[in-house]
Amino acid sequence: MARKVSILALIFLIIVLQLCSYFNPCSASNGYNHRKSKEFIKKSCRATSYPKLCLKSLARRASKIKGNPELLASAALSTTLFATQTTSRLLKDTSRIHSLKPNEVAAMVDCIADLSDSVQKLQMSTKVMDEGTKNNDVVRVDGSDDVVRVQINDIQMWVNMALEEEETCMIALANMNVKGRVKKGIRKRIVKVAHLTSNALDLVKNCALAHNK
């Protein structure tokens, strides 16, 4: 009797699993889709200025990007914004070090202002791109591709301005006579932010090219 029950339970389990796979076919292919998305990211990153950093910073978001150029650009902008905000806070904390000379503090304050402007431009870019990627597609406000082109062109302009601010910050740091370790650590973070911004700009440009075809 017990053996008969166990056999019936096994048959029931098999039927349930088959029904699950039938009604939710995507679950069976999640691994494949994830790999496919990572390949898409890898291929897209080859067209950026810093492909290794691009892949490293975006690979973890493969399941959300799903092979979509707009979602890829949006993820790149979000990643860049977070890194820039973190670096800006680091500079603010470093500027409070009492051993810094007045001219060094002034240069640091200028750099902080540059990064703050960069954060603002990236926030604007991220907001517009996120609004444009609702439902995994570009939102056409009036149903026209012209609106999409204007939005993407605006994003390109803002990201490019953010990159210029970061480069200005690096120049300010280069002229600072700060202790080697502190200066090296800060510069490393800002260079990474600039490289992330450059990659994000490249990926946004890819979206622009796609919509201009």
Image (cartoon, rainbow, N blue to C red):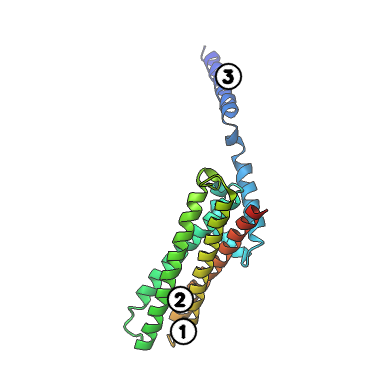
Spatial CA span between label 3 and label 1: 70 Å
Please state the horizontal and vertical placement of residue 186, each as a whole percent of the image.
Answer: 45, 76
Which quadrant would residue 203 be assigned to in this image?
bottom right
Instruction: Assess disc 1: are there few (<14), some (14-19) or many (≥20) residues with their C-alpha within 10 Å of its C-alpha.
Output: few
Q: Residues within 10 Å of mark 3 (few under 14, many from 20)?
A: few
Query: Is residue 192 something one can see in this rendering?
Result: no
Measured in 3D between alpha carbons, the distance from the residue under mark 3 to the one under mark 2, in whole angstroms, is 63 Å
- Amino acid beneath label 1: Gly
Q: Would you place residue 84 above or below residue 170 in this image? A: above
Q: Nearer the viewer, mark 3 or mark 2?
A: 2
Instruction: Compute the Cα span from label 1 to label 2.
Output: 10 Å
Q: Earlier in the sequence, mark 3 or mark 2?
A: 3
Q: Which of 147/39 is in front? A: 147
Give the residue at x 62% y 43%.
33
In this view, the mark in front (3 or 1): 1
> Taking 188 as reference, is 61 above or below it?
above
Q: Where does the image place residue 143, in percent across and percent down from the top left?
A: 55, 44
> Closer to the observer: label 1 or label 2?
2
Disc 2 residue type (three-letter): Ile
Q: Position of residue 54 (x, y in %)?
A: 59, 62
Name the residue at the top extreme. 1
Q: Which mark is residue 11?
A: 3
Q: Is residue 21 left or right of residue 111?
A: right
The residue identified by callout 2 is: 186
Q: Secondary structure at mark 1?
A: helix
The picture places residue 144, in percent across and down from the top left corner, at 57, 47
**Residue at which label 1 appears:** 180
